[in-house]
Each structure stands twice: as C-alpha cells, then as structure tokens.
Image: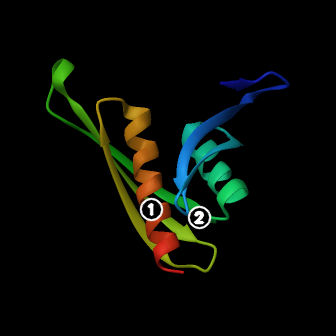
C-alpha cells in the first residue's frame, strides 16, 4: 500500500516464520520486493539486497504460474539465488526473496 506521506513509497506488512516462531514484519520501499527486503532486514536481521530479478510465466491463460528468480547479495558479499512460484506474480516474487533470505540465514 502507498505511504500516505510519501506517494512513491510502498509499505509492506507480512507474516513470516523466523527462528521457529511466526511474527509480523513491516518494511518500506519503492515496491513490494524492496519493502519485503527492508522488513526482513529491520525485523529479522537478514541483510540482503536484490542484485537481479527475472520473472517468467509457465503456461498461458488463467492456469499460468509465475516463476520469479532473485539474485541477492548478503551484507558480507555472498551472492545467493532464490526462486518462487505462484499464480500471483507478487507472491511469486516474495517467495523468491524468502528463498534467498533462507539461504542467507543458512550460510551464516
């Protein structure tokens, strides 16, 4: 959703499972991916930045699935990939970020 005070900024709220417990996280960015990355960094201590992003459809019409690929870099400079798939393109993107973030946490 847009930030009421800054129309170019998007606010993102999400519910994630981190360290075995479910929690609500919030972030800000120029879109849902940036907002989610911000939320993971601020609320979970998972510092990544998205270096590259691609999305493809698998199929056509109402049965199509979106597949998102994220290339991310940790604050330590490690490059990781994440992949997400969903019928909703935004959800597929956020799943890809989650995949990369999980890899970043596992690499610590």
Q: Badge 2, how many Cα within 10 Å: few under 14, some, many 20+?
A: many
Task: Locate residue 67: give its quadrant.
Answer: top left
What residue is shown with label 2?
Answer: 48
From the viewer's side, name the closer residue of 10 and 95.
Answer: 95
Q: Residue furthest right?
A: 5
From the viewer's side, name the closer residue of 23 and 79.
Answer: 23
Q: Is residue 14 above or below residue 102?
A: above
Q: Is residue 9 above or below residue 102?
A: above
User: Which quarter of the image is occupied by the N terminus?
Assistant: top right
Q: Residue at x 39, y 65 (%)?
A: 81
State the SS at label 2.
Answer: strand
Q: Is residue 68 left or right of residue 34?
A: left
From the viewer's side, name the closer residue of 6 and 21.
Answer: 21
Q: Could you tell me if the residues under marks 2 and 1 are in contact, i.e. CB atoms within 8 Å? A: yes
Q: Is residue 24 left or right of residue 53?
A: right
Query: What color scheme is it?
Result: rainbow
User: Which quarter of the image is occupied by the C terminus?
Assistant: bottom right
| Residue 56 coordinates in the image, percent (x, y) | 27, 41
Q: Residue furthest left?
A: 59
| Residue 10 coordinates in the image, percent (x, y) | 68, 32
Q: Is residue 94 left or right of residue 47?
A: left
Q: Is residue 57 above or below residue 1?
A: below
State the SS at label 1.
Answer: helix
Q: Is residue 19 above or below residue 90?
A: below
What residue is shown with label 1?
Answer: 100
Earlier in the chain: of badge 2 and badge 1, it is: 2
Q: Residue at x 70, y 54 (%)?
A: 43
| Residue 68 coordinates in the image, percent (x, y) | 34, 46
Q: Residue at x 46, y 57 (%)?
A: 52
From the viewer's side, name the closer residue of 52 and 107.
Answer: 107
Q: Residue at x 56, y 41 (%)?
A: 15
| Residue 42 coordinates in the image, percent (x, y) | 73, 56
């Amino acid at each position: 959703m847009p930030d009421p005070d800054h129309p170019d900024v998007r606010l993102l709220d999400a519910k994630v499972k981190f360290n075995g417990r479910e929690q609500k996280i919030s972030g800000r960015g120029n879109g849902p991916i940036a907002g989610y990355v911000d939320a993971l960094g601020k609320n979970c201590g998972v510092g990544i930045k998205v270096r590259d992003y691609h999305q493809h459809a698998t199929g056509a019409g109402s049965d199509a699935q979106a597949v998102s690929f994220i290339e991310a870099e940790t604050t330590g400079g490690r490059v990781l990939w994440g992949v997400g798939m969903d019928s909703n393109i935004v959800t597929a993107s956020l799943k890809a970020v989650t995949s990369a973030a999980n890899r970043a946490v596992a690499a610590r």
